[in-house]
Amino acid sequence: MATTSYLGTGRYKLLPLSPSSSNLRSCCCRPSPSKPLVPTRPGSRVCNLGSVFERHKSVIFLPQNAASMHRRVITAVARAEPDRIDEGNAKQEVGKGHTLSAKEDSVSELKEKTSQLKTRIVFGLGIGITAGGIVLAGGWVFTVALAAVVFVGAREYFELVRSHGITEGMTPPPRYVSRVCSVICAVMPILTLYLGQIDVSVTFAAFVVAMSLLLQRGIPRFAQLSSAMFGLFYCGYLPCFWVKLRCGLSAPALNTRATWPILLGGPAHWTVGLVATLISISSIIAADTFAFLGGKTFGRTPLTSISPKKTWEGTFAGLGGCVATSVILSKIFCWPTSVLSAIAFGFLNFLGSIFGDLTESMIKRDAGVKDSGSLIPGHGGILDRVDSYVFTGALAYSFVKIFLPLYGV
């Protein structure tokens, strides 16, 4: 708001002062407002200045013989107020700029998170529908799809082993050994389907890898052998139990008959292997979902330093969701017939899920990476999606084969 200043001389004659007047522009002196005005002529006395504020008007009273002070007073009054106005406006503009910048950052961050969530949901639904069709098809369709997943997962594993975070403390296997191991891991599920067992193939693969490491140029390291053997076990041997579970347990679980195209295996029953595979996969999905929601809502107590975002509250929520899903689906599929067996099956599925998740988190933590790869938008790599399934297949198959010898009685 503009302020009008008046100068009084002698008998308080008020003269309006405007910052835009010519006499103000012509004066180049600018004393500090905080210092008193001192007369320049000898013998002159100090001026008594008084300022009377009348709402938005300032009145300054000067004696008549202070003509030499007029210009200084006028300059000080005229220049001080616009400076204060300019400084205030500058501060307001800076504050507005910071506020707008913060709002723009928050809006852009929200848009980015929304876009990532949409991408994650779209690709998650696509993967789920495709995986469901492959599980229902079974046979060679299921086995070949699993072999492809195993090959990509093995490649990601050996890339993690060769990462900077892990190679600081060990010597990784040569690249040709990593590639041979990836191929062997992909062949294992196919051999399991047609041979019905996996012991011979695993033993032969371990022998080939050990010989290739011992005959390499340079000095072989035990770290190379241990990382390669664990890769065969983690990426090749354990996934083969899903083939044995889905395709090996062929006893009918329901009095139904599904008719598939010849390319998908032809007519087939709802076998124990199919039902157990569907219940196991659905339980794992429920465990991951309930653990995520429970951890976001109630998570307070960290579960382990391997994965700081996991909490005990989320773990118990995932366990409850996994067991509940197993019991509900057992009532729908009429397998297993005992509620206690369904609870035990769900509990084993959850143990395999959480153990596999923590194992992959440990590998990534040592490697110093967030995701095992970038193949699936919004999800990361193959290992990031299937880590919960690696150990679960072996536990589910062992449960059905050992604890339920009569397939659900």
Image (cartoon, rainbow, N blue to C red):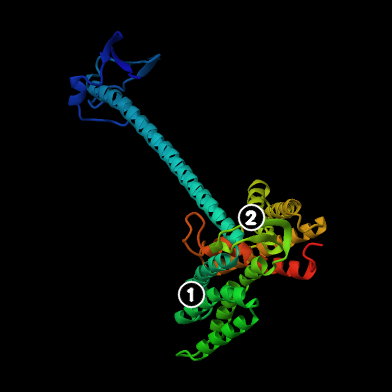
Q: Name the quadrant of the C terminus.
A: bottom right
Residue 370 horizontal/vertical position (percent)? 52, 61
Would you say residue 95 is visible in this rendering? Answer: yes
Q: CA distance from mark 2 to mark 1?
A: 31 Å
Question: What's the amino acid at mark 2?
Answer: Ile
Residue 317 horizontal/vertical position (percent)? 70, 51
Few, some or many residues within 10 Å of mark 2 (<14, 14–19, 20+): many
Closer to the eye: label 2 or 1: 2
Q: Looking at the picture, tell me which residue is in the foreground, 76 or 238.
A: 238
The residue identified by callout 1 is 162
- The kind of secondary structure element at disc 1 is loop
**In which quarter of the view is residue 88 placed?**
top left
Q: Residue at x 50, y 81 (%)?
A: 173
Label drawn at residue 285: 2
Residue 166 horizontal/vertical position (percent)? 52, 74
Instruction: Reply above or below: 6 against 308.
Output: above
* Mark closer to the chain start, 2 or 1: 1
Q: Name the quadrant of the N terminus.
A: top left
Instruction: Reply above or below: 295 against 82.
Output: below
